[in-house]
Amino acid sequence: MRSALLLCVVPILLAAFLLTGAAGPSENLGATIRSRQWPLQAMEVRTAWQTTRGAGVTIAVLDTGVDDQHPDLSGAVVQGPDFTGTASAPGAGPSCDAGTGAGPSVSTGGKADGKADGSAQRAASGKHGTAMAALIAGRGHGPSRSYGVLGVAPEARILSIKVTLDDDDPRWTDAARATCRDAVARGIRYAVDHGAQVISMSLGSGSGAYRGSPAEERAVRYALSRQVVLIASSGNDGAGANRRNFPAAYPGVIAVGAVDQALRPAPFSNRQRYLSLVAPGTEIVSARGGHSYVTADGTSAAAALVAGVAALIRSRYPDLPARDVRRALQQGASLRPPGGRDDAYGTGMANARRAIEAAGRL
């Protein structure tokens, strides 16, 4: 994480991704990637697919942008605006209005027309955002889509809204950060106003320097008033300072921590009273910009997986209020800790099958 992001105005990413594999998908690589998707079994996702695969739901991914040309995301992504201030014309200073035209039209039913306003600049895709989108709604590729990454909700639609840049992006300058201090707040409001039923935010600061803002808290309240489900990563400095992390710590946001393959709390996962539940967050394989794949550790991935489960619930029960989607996720969690909750595990580990069943009882 870069010290330049210590200005309390923008989020940074919660996972360091390592490239694994060739520059372009192959059958062998694609099959290997699919075989390594251990969260699908741990969260009983395939059983949940007997009920729903997320059709009719739009999930807004507030992140670094999404590569809609990756084979595993073909047809799954609608490009929204860029609120980072880096979409300005060459030679121009950063402007938060660059790339923020009317953008794609997404109906309240979650279907998008895929057409962007002519005045809107296309947001350049990012590595981190692509990985998160694939965990949520990856569709795989090849014969019968048997290769590559399958997301938790493979029939859902992604609305990509760019609110930050990858940690190694040289465009993330002091001027851009100072100009676009409310990128996340604007992204939340845009998502709500363009029909997203779920908002996924794998954002925050493991250093604890980023502490949120009144504008973001107002945007969160606005989303909740419109029955939009908000999900965020809990933070990655649990083995150290274990600081509060935003947007996860805002009231009403579903904060997600990470577990390892033994389903134990990952050492880096923040332990906080605001933690809602946990999900797989180590050795997570996903897509990456440029037709490649990555392996990642972090609460970023855990939050994206839970966003996929929320999409399954919303697909099966479209009229369920946001507070009841949260209740279904928590009541349906497996491996509940003694007493029903603790700061390391929340109410338990996200389980897609059980969450859908819990939603049906609400």
Image: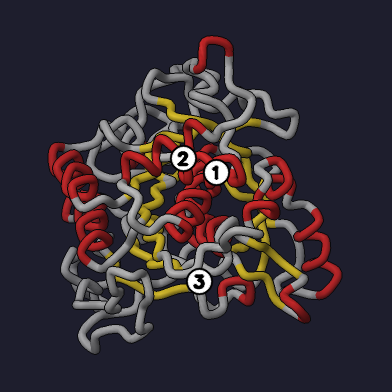
Disc 1: which residue: 357
**Amino acid on which disc 1 is placed:** Glu
Per the image, label 1 sits on a secondary structure element best described as: helix
Left or right: where 322 falls relative to 38? left
Quadrant hosting residue 58: bottom left
Residue 361 image label:
2
**Amino acid on which disc 2 is placed:** Arg
Left or right: where 24 falls relative to 119? right
Q: Residue most toward the bottom?
A: 118
- Crowd around label 3: few <14 · some 14–19 · many ≥20 (10 Å): many
**Residue at x-position 47% and y-position 19%:** 271
Residue 99 placement (x, y as % from top left): 25, 74
Residue 306 placement (x, y as % from top left): 51, 45
- Crowd around label 2: few <14 · some 14–19 · many ≥20 (10 Å): few
Residue 234 placement (x, y as % from top left): 44, 32
Q: How far apart are marks 3 and 2 (CA)?
A: 38 Å
Question: Which callout, 1 or 3, points at the residue further toward the start of the chain?
Answer: 3
Front one among 252 and 301: 252
**Residue at x-position 77% and y-position 71%:** 146
